[in-house]
Amino acid sequence: MPVKIERLAIIGLGLIGSSIARAVKARGLAATIVACDASDFVRARVSELRLADVVTADAADAVREADLVISCIPVGGNGALSQAIGPHLKPGAIVTDVGSVKGAVLRDMAPHLPEHVHFIPGHPIAGAETSGPDAGFAELFDNRWTILTPPEGADEAAITLLRSFWESMGALVEIMTTDHHDLVLAITSHLPHLIAYNIVGTAADLEAVTQSEVIKFSAGGFRDFTRIAASDPTMWRDVFLTNKDAVLEMLGRFNEDLAALQRMIRWGDGDGLHDLFTRTRSIRKGIVALGQETAEPDFGRRKSAASAPEVQDKAILTK
Amino acid sequence: MPVKIERLAIIGLGLIGSSIARAVKARGLAATIVACDASDFVRARVSELRLADVVTADAADAVREADLVISCIPVGGNGALSQAIGPHLKPGAIVTDVGSVKGAVLRDMAPHLPEHVHFIPGHPIAGAETSGPDAGFAELFDNRWTILTPPEGADEAAITLLRSFWESMGALVEIMTTDHHDLVLAITSHLPHLIAYNIVGTAADLEAVTQSEVIKFSAGGFRDFTRIAASDPTMWRDVFLTNKDAVLEMLGRFNEDLAALQRMIRWGDGDGLHDLFTRTRSIRKGIVALGQETAEPDFGRRKSAASAPEVQDKAILTK
């Protein structure tokens, strides 16, 4: 049964925050939506798009009387935010967030939140390379997992309510510890972003191959990496600063494996290469079978080709 | 004006070879299509799909009387192939290929080809993670670049004809040296594949994070890499064995940059991270502007979501 929140406060109306607002509105999950954002531009767009019933720049105002408060700001800002809202939270309110790192969020927020609220960090594994209030959409969480990381001793009723809230938006919910979350996400999300940012940076810095050649011939594989490397810089800076240990651990393993692969290439170990390249195929099959990825070749890009611009922008090709 | 080839021989009817057959048939670019493949299964499928007028297992037979011969086999097999077909080629025939590496193809094939044919290596920068005669489609080369690498002194009329052939299939054609091709592709295609194979391998080998968790939470970025890492193992083994020097050069640069990035994370250099993450955004804009990528968020995956299987395969979640 879908939950019904009396008063919902969303802090930060970017891709995730505005998607929550849209999903809640579309499914009637809250009587009143309060949207809070520090940016004049974002608040103006939120009003124009009619994403909320109340729009404010003041976080203390936003959370007063709210039954559920969701922080949707880059994780680095959560310490200051909880300091600002702590004294104004209503007894019994649930406070949660959507950050990609959970250990740091718990560490930064918990000390500033009063005993009389239920703090349950969360993280929807959903997103896109786009940012801002215009980028969101109501179906973003459909059939995607949201992980909740309730601290030890958290109120069961509050956990159940928050779980139902996410499920009502179409999400699948899993519960785990903050440490395990940060390790899982380090490999499934943070390291992939790090690698993508890095290879795009490497390509941009070459002298022997021009940037226009990298762009023209990107369909051979490179372009896939550029999507991830177009993600929000502030959000990702904060992720790497706050999940440092787990990311460095996974990066260390990646580097060891890459050194072994490099050696196979240098010494012409064709069997070793073929073995690895065969083994990696099965993981994708699992992802497709689980509905976490389209089964169509090339991400089904071809269906979107009609909307792609024609090749006429020759200006970009000048070297 | 579209070209018209009298007799076209395609050796190897995988994704690329079968896509050429389909494109040629759909646009009427050849009077007769001869398909040659060593696999009984592939030949049977080619006959069932009516991709060619003549189907044979014998490469010497296939190229006799052919005006244009296209090798579409993994690059490692081209030496043996050219040895087999060399004595049977018709004077004035054009011989080309579609391999991802051009230096090795020139080195392996040229010595076995008679003086009286025109050998012009080629490479369409198009593909998908799927393989085999059923995976191909006539529009694969539409608005994608094909690179030709004619050896010094190659016949201009033959180059023009081959260029027209590719353009008639919808491709954009660029001409460059084999060395430059191999360097450009090392960064735009080979290194991305190497990195993708590597990270998927790293994820598969973890103990602290189960494979089912990697699969479930892959929407955070990891799944993008699994597409590339599902590419044909034999083709890619050959690429890394035959373009070793350029790949190791690009890998060296990637590693240097990654070490610098690792250091930024370890020492908490937020500004350095933010700078890199901002710089990498512009390259994707260029790729989208040039029509080499869909402009839609998330590769436009959501449009294909209807065809994705429902989340019901719980068996895959057993740990």
Image (cartoon, coloured by chain):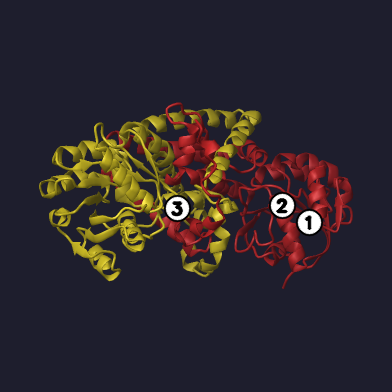
Chain colours: A red, B yellow
Q: Is residue A31 visible?
A: yes
Q: Which residue is mark 2?
A: A134
Cα–Cα span, label 1 and label 2:
8 Å
Cα–Cα span, label 2 and label 3:
28 Å
What secondary structure is marked by label 2? loop
Whether tag 1 and tag 2 are in contact, CB under 8 A, the answer is: yes
Identity of the residue drawn at 22% across and 41% down: B119
Image coordinates for residue A208, horizontal then vertical, percent: 42, 27
What secondary structure is marked by label 1? loop
Number of the label disc, if any, that sits on residue B227: 3
Q: Which residue is mark 1?
A: A49
Identity, as a three-letter code, of the amino acid under mark 3: Arg
Instruction: Write down the chain letter for disc 2.
Output: A
Q: Nearer the viewer, mark 3 or mark 1?
A: 1
Q: Residues within 10 Å of mark 3 (few under 14, many from 20)?
A: many
In this rendering, would B75 be left or right of A305? left
